[in-house]
């Protein structure tokens, strides 16, 4: 399959993996990259101020009330803590030039809403085409729940 026919998709932590995969492909040199990326509620910044201080955390029915940063970073301990500003751990801090166009979807009540909004700003700053769709009154990863009854039709 030609990379020009591939759209890379990732949701939540998988969105983070999709971004960092494309960064690694770009940095490797002549490796082809996908045509586009679709990211749903992507984790983009592991720094504390984006994971614990978003006022929307209390409204997010999927991850609200969960100590998100402790859950994500705590398991890996101090080794990861010391590296949260590295671009492959916090791609919002990376040079995003040359990445393929992105469609990013997040919920209005998204627990990681602030970091996603900041990532969209950084993507635009690096002249990468991006569309950001915010689901009204929706939560983290809401797109994946469309047919479960958790999301109104």
Image: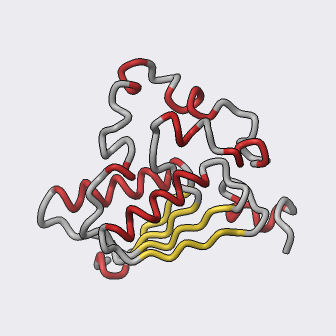
x and y percentages locating residue 80 in the rendered image: 38, 26
* Image quarter hosting the C terminus: bottom right
x and y percentages locating residue 141 in the rendered image: 66, 57
Relative side of 128 to 105, left or right: left
Q: 99 or 51: which is nearer to us?
A: 51
Measuring 48% from the left and 57% from the top, which residue is drawn there? Answer: 118
Colour scheme shown: secondary structure
Measuring 32% from the left and 45% from the top, which residue is drawn there? Answer: 88
* Image quarter hosting the N terminus: bottom left
The single residue placed furthest to the top in the displayed view is 78
Q: 101 or 8: which is nearer to us?
A: 101
Measuring 62% from the left and 38% from the top, which residue is drawn there? Answer: 53
Relative side of 18 to 153, left or right: left
Q: Is residue 35 above or below residue 27?
A: below
Relative side of 63 to 33, left or right: right
Q: Is residue 7 above or below residue 68?
A: below
Q: 151 or 46: which is nearer to us?
A: 46
Residue 123: quarter of image: bottom left
x and y percentages locating residue 18 in the rendered image: 41, 57
x and y percentages locating residue 31 in the rendered image: 18, 65
Residue 81: quarter of image: top left
The single residue placed furthest to the left in the displayed view is 30
Q: Is residue 13 above or below residue 79?
A: below
Measuring 75% from the left and 61% from the top, which residue is drawn there? Answer: 138
Total number of numbered discs in the rendering = 0
């Amino acid at each position: 399959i030609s990379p020009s026919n591939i759209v890379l998709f990732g949701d939540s932590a998988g969105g983070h993996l999709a971004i960092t995969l494309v960064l690694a492909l770009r940095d490797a040199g002549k490796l082809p990259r996908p045509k586009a990326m679709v990211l749903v509620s992507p984790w983009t910044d592991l720094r504390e101020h984006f994971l614990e201080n978003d006022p929307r955390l209390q409204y997010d029915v999927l991850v609200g009330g969960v100590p998100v940063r402790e859950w994500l970073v705590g398991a890996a301990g101090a080794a990861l803590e010391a590296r949260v500003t590295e671009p492959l751990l916090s791609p919002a801090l990376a040079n995003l030039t040359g990445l393929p166009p992105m469609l990013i979807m997040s919920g209005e009540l998204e627990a990681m809403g602030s970091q996603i909004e900041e990532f969209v700003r950084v993507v635009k700053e690096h002249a990468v085409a991006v569309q950001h769709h915010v689901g009204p009154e929706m939560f983290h990863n809401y797109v994946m729940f469309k047919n479960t009854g958790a999301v109104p039709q």
